[in-house]
Image (spheres, grey):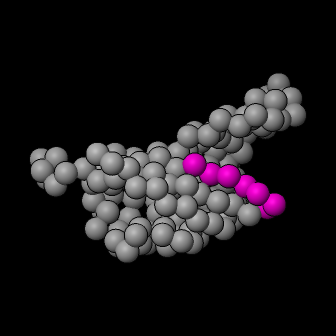
Amino acid sequence: MEMTKVTGKFDVKLTPENAYATGVGGVNLGRMALDKTFYGELEARSQGEMLSAMTAVKGSAGYVAIEQVVGKLCGRQGSFVLQHFGIMTDGQNRLHLEVVPHSGAGELTGLYGTMAISIENGQHFYEFSFCFEPASEVEG
């Protein structure tokens, strides 16, 4: 299947929440609410939660997050869930965002793909590569 790629900007608001656990040995564990607005071919809003671990070594941390995206993708109305996995080692980022299988709903049923995020001069950008499963695989 051929992947479609769309790009655009997004705004994000992170709101600290009470964390269940606190870190020891120089590690700070955190929990935040995510609120995003996407612009471009992905015209949507999302909400989710993020867990993070900041180490005592500057530039080394990790996070995981889940967010549900609701809106339009290339004119198709629906929703899907993105799962994040991010690691930073000495300031070098490795970030993976992927659509949770079978999380697409509405006109986005059968959606799967990956998203890359970049930040330039304080503005957040996305690059979303996606495709749809054939209808017979979605229904089965």
Segment colored magenta: 116-122
Instruction: Please provide percent x and percent y for residue 49.
Output: 58, 53
Q: Residue at x 40, y 55 (%)?
A: 4
Visible in this render: residue 44?
no
Q: Is residue 96 above or below residue 18?
A: above
Q: Quadrant of residue 62?
A: top right
- Residue 119 seen from this side: yes
Question: Could you say where residue 23 lies in the image, as x and y percent from the top left?
Answer: 76, 33
Q: Residue at x 28, y 68 (%)?
A: 107
Looking at the rendered structure, the number of numbered marks drawn on it comes to 0
Q: Is residue 68 above or below residue 40?
A: above
Picture coordinates of residue 7 (x, y %)? 55, 61
Say which residue appears at 58% left-offset and 65% top-offset. 8
Which x, y percent locates residue 12?
66, 64
- Hey, which residue is sitting farthest top in the picture? 25
Prevailing secondary structure of the magenta residues = strand
